[in-house]
Image: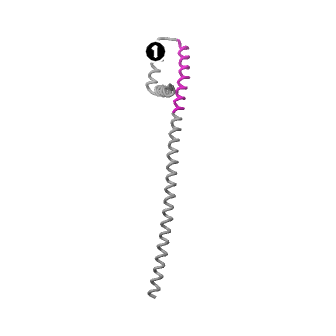
């Protein structure tokens, strides 16, 4: 069974909670409760330091995952852009070919008109 998606979801949830006002309220209540019960401040300092280490790790993991997702989205966007460029180049190539054919047809029509003008001048002149 793949644990990675669950762990990533858990990491995101923890980082989201820590980075919210609910996280601030929960920590404030916890520290106030600790101090009201008059537990050891040294022990509280130890737990706060340990918690800070884990919070830092969770936030870094969430940031890394967000960067990976951003990189994937950018790669998909670049792929789409490259496909659009290829399609545009192909369209430009076809249009250039059609324009060349139109120019050739116009040149042929111009030659025919010049030829007809010459024949009309010879008949009238």
Element assignment for label 1: helix
Residue 29 horizontal/vertical position (percent) = 45, 18
Residue 88, above or below 21:
below
Residue 46 horizontal/vertical position (percent) = 56, 16
Image point 47% across, 70% down: which residue? 106
Q: Which residues are magenta?
A: 40-65
Q: What kind of secondary structure does the magenta stretch mostly adopt?
A: helix
Residue 54 horizontal/vertical position (percent) = 54, 23
In terms of depth relative to the viewer, which is nearer, 79 or 38? 79
Residue 116 horizontal/vertical position (percent) = 46, 79
Image point 53% across, 12% down: which residue? 40
Quick one: which residue is furthest to the bottom in this view? 125
Q: Is residue 25 magenta?
A: no
Near mark 1 (Cα within 10 A), the count class, few <14, some 14-19 or many ≥20, is few
Q: Is residue 51 magenta?
A: yes
In terms of depth relative to the viewer, which is nearer, 39 or 99? 99
Identify the residue position indicated by label 1 in the image.
33
In this picture the colour scheme is one colour
Count the marks: how many?
A: 1
Residue 78, above or below 2:
below
Image point 54% across, 17% down: which residue? 47
């Amino acid at each position: 069974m793949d644990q990675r998606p669950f762990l990533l979801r858990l990491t995101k949830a923890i980082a989201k909670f820590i980075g919210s006002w609910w996280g601030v309220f929960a920590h404030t209540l916890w520290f106030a409760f600790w101090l009201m019960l008059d537990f050891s401040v040294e022990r509280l300092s130890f737990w706060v330091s340990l918690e800070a280490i884990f919070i830092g790790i969770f936030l870094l993991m969430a940031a890394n995952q967000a960067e990976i997702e951003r990189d994937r989205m950018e790669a998909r966007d670049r792929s789409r852009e490259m496909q659009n460029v290829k399609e545009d180049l192909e369209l430009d190539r076809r249009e250039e070919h059609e324009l060349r054919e139109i120019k050739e047809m116009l040149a042929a029509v111009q030659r025919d008109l010049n030829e007809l003008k010459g024949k009309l001048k010879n008949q009238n002149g």
